[in-house]
Image (spheres, rainbow, N blue to C red):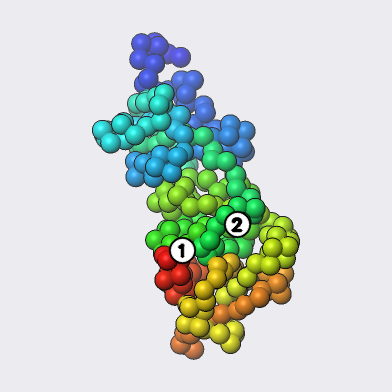
């Protein structure tokens, strides 16, 4: 630690500062796994995490950023606040997106498929989605339209809290049950518990208008725009539905499809 850091222990002004290393470590998936912590960018997202019960260990700000009184008042008891020199911030984040205000938090406890037993509303099932923007948009839409939770099939739990995905969801992923499972384990659960699994299929006979009034919880599966759901999900589906679109368009983006489908189910979800 240099002399300036020694005199001001809450100022991080060098990569040699003892607090700089953990921040850099959390920029990697293996680092998040090792430390069991996550990095949350931007005050709005940090406040959403706190509101959802996430424990904040430490808060950092740099450059001209200031920590609002609202954030200070709502921080987890015992959380420390540190200033990072602007030039040091750039060095810490290096090739990643630089953040001027961010927090280190405890990783939320993982949620498995058994959590479905306590959810009465529809649940969105996303199989093999990897684009943060799509997952983030679907998460925000799901929360807005009253969905009970989201299952991410074949996603490593440590990737659920990648800072890009947190940003894409505007921090709302902390406010919904986010369940991770393999396709095989999910389908095994569905079979044992007689779940109603609906797959969005552009060739289905039923349209989303016909599923709007079904008075039972649905597990609604979406695959990638390019590949769709796996044959295993398709074969296990107890129901299929499509969004009627013009034949001038081959397909819709998965987040658009989810938004339209979930809106059609919003009366059920907001009533339960």
Q: Is residue 251 depicted above or below 112 in this figure?
A: below
Q: Residues within 10 Å of mark 2 (few under 14, many from 20)?
A: many
Residue 52 placement: quadrant: top left
Which residue is rendered at x = 42% and y = 71% of the image? 267
Which residue is rendered at x = 41% and y = 65% of the image? 270
Figure disc tally: 2
Left or right, residue 127 beside residue 264: right
Q: CA distance from mark 1 to mark 2?
A: 15 Å
Left or right, residue 138 beside residue 130: left
Q: Is residue 270 depicted above or below 203 in this figure?
A: above
Query: Is disc 1 in contact with disc 2, using a CB cutoff of under 8 Å?
Result: no
Left or right, residue 12 beside residue 230: left
Q: Position of residue 254 (x, y in %)?
A: 51, 69
Is label 2 in a helix, a strand or a loop? Answer: helix
Q: Position of residue 41 (x, y in %)?
A: 41, 41
Q: Residues within 10 Å of mark 1 (few under 14, many from 20)?
A: some
Residue 128 placement: quadrant: bottom right
Q: Which residue is mark 1?
A: 272
Is label 1 in a helix, a strand or a loop? Answer: loop
Label number found at residue 116: 2
Label number found at residue 53: none
Q: Is residue 169 visible?
A: yes
Marked residue nearer the N-terminal end (1 or 2):
2
Q: Is residue 65 visible?
A: no
Which residue is rendered at x = 60% and y = 52% of the image? 115
């Amino acid at each position: 630690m240099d002399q300036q850091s020694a005199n001001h222990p809450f100022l991080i002004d060098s990569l040699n500062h003892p607090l700089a290393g953990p921040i850099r470590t959390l920029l990697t998936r293996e680092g998040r796994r090792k430390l069991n912590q996550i990095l949350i960018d931007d005050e709005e997202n940090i406040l959403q995490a706190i509101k959802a019960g996430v424990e904040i260990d430490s808060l950092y700000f740099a450059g001209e950023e200031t920590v609002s009184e609202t954030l200070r008042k709502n921080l987890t008891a015992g959380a420390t606040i540190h200033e990072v020199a602007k030039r040091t911030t750039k060095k810490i984040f290096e090739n990643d997106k630089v953040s001027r205000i961010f927090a280190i938090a405890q990783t939320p406890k993982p949620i498995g498929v058994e959590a479905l037993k306590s959810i009465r509303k529809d649940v969105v099932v996303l199989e093999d989605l990897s684009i943060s923007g799509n997952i983030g948009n679907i998460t925000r839409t799901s929360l807005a339209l009253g969905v009970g939770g989201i299952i991410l099939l074949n996603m490593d739990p440590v990737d659920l809290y990648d800072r890009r995905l947190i940003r894409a969801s505007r921090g709302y992923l902390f406010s919904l049950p986010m369940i991770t499972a393999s396709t095989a384990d999910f389908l095994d659960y569905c079979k044992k518990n007689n779940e109603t699994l609906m797959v969005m299929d552009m060739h289905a006979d039923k349209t989303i208008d016909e599923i709007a009034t079904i008075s039972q919880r649905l597990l609604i599966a979406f695959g990638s725009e390019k590949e769709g759901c796996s044959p295993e999900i398709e074969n296990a589906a107890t129901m299929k539905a499509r969004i009627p679109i013009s034949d001038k368009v081959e397909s819709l983006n998965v987040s658009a499809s989810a938004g339209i489908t979930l809106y059609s189910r919003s009366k059920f979800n907001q009533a339960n």
